[in-house]
Image (cartoon, rainbow, N blue to C red):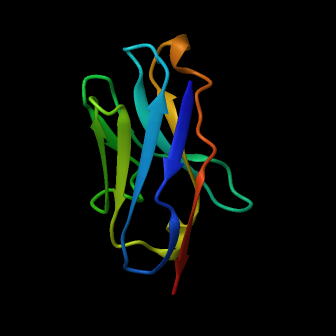
Amino acid sequence: VQLVESGGGSVQAGGSLKLSCAVSGYIFYGCGRAWYRQAPGKERELVSSISSDGAKRYADSVKGRFTISQDNAENKVYLQMNSLKNEDAGVYYCAADGPYSDCGGYWGQGTQVTVSS
């Protein structure tokens, strides 16, 4: 199984980016997908998740600005990020997510998001 993120880059505060995560290989059907981020010196945190039945969750800090979506046919998950703030900067990781043990351990390599003032 491979998860490959893309779409990161540098953007000015207030700008937008759309991250993509392409999943190859089989992950248990009951697993959803999630986006995490890690800023320098900080712990990795959950940004957003989408369950296998489409339920979406967002960290309070990104509600109203970020949107998670998925294309089941293409086995891709996206994160549209609008109104970016300096504190959104970090490495963004795609991961499998869900309440089953089969959902654990699947991570992408990360994509860097830099936000400048």
Viewport quadrant of the N terminus: top right
Residue 98's place in the image compared with 115, above or below, is: above
Q: What x and y, as percent, mark residue 88?
A: 50, 66
Give the image location of residue 93, x and y in percent: 56, 46
The reply, left or right, for residue 42 in relation to residue 23 is right
Residue at image location 37% in from the left, 77% down from the top: 15
Left or right: where 96 falls relative to 111? left
Spot the residue most to the right: 41
Q: Position of residue 5 (x, y in %)?
A: 51, 47
Numbered label tally: 0
Query: Residue sitting at 36 percent across and 71 percent down?
Result: 16
Q: Residue furthest bottom?
A: 117
Residue placed most toward the observer, 11 or 74? 74
Residue 21, by quadrant, is: top left
Q: Is 22 left, or right, of 110 in this rendering?
A: left
Left or right, residue 64 beside residue 87: left
Q: Is residue 27 above or below residue 21?
A: above
Residue 27 drawn at (x, y percent): 47, 18
